[in-house]
Image (cartoon, helix red, strand yellow):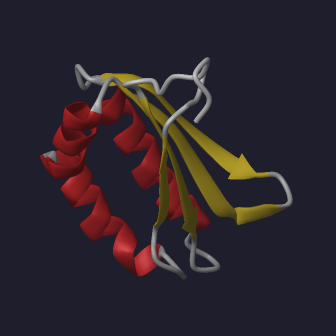
Amino acid sequence: MSSHSKKSELLYLVATLEAVPGSEGLLLDALSALVLQSRAEPGCIQYDLHVDIADAKTLIVYEIWRNQQALDDHASSSHFQAFLKTAEPMLSAPLDVKVLNRID
């Protein structure tokens, strides 16, 4: 890393979910509820749900968390754990999560 770049404490997360064909609407409903609950968490800065224009089975969540503790708290929250159990049969592939540091 160059000397003029610094790592942010904020964590940026991109989660990609692939719905089983026919379950797109149910997965979208479950994610929509999760978005509202996650945005209410004190360490959540941004939590946005997107659908791929070319493929409605692909849903992407873009998140920004204040720090690692906030992300850990989210991952262990009852609403996120309940979402995982609900979503599992609707996913055609494992949840793909990338946690990123933004370089300024």
Tell me the residue at 29%/29% (across/down).
67
The quadrant holding residue 44 is: top left
The quadrant holding residue 56 is: bottom right
x and y, in percent, of residue 60 in the image? 60, 51
x and y, in percent, of residue 57 in the image? 67, 67
The outermost residue toward the right is: 54
x and y, in percent, of residue 103 in the image? 58, 29
The quarter in which the N terminus is drawn is top right
- Vertical side of 70 occupied by 80: above or below: below
Of 43 and 85, nearer the camera is 43
The quadrant holding residue 11 is: top left
- Vertical side of 21 occupied by 98: above or below: above
x and y, in percent, of residue 27 in the image? 49, 61
Of 86 and 73, nearer the camera is 73
Tell me the residue at 54%/64% (across/down).
17
The quarter in which the C terminus is drawn is top right
Of 74 and 6, nearer the camera is 6
User: Tag count in the figure?
Assistant: 0
- Vertical side of 82 occupied by 67: above or below: above
Horizontal side of 23 relative to 65 (left or right) equals right
Tell me the residue at 55%/72% (across/down).
23
- Vertical side of 69 occupied by 13: above or below: below
Tell me the residue at 13%/49% (across/down).
78
Of 103 and 96, nearer the camera is 103
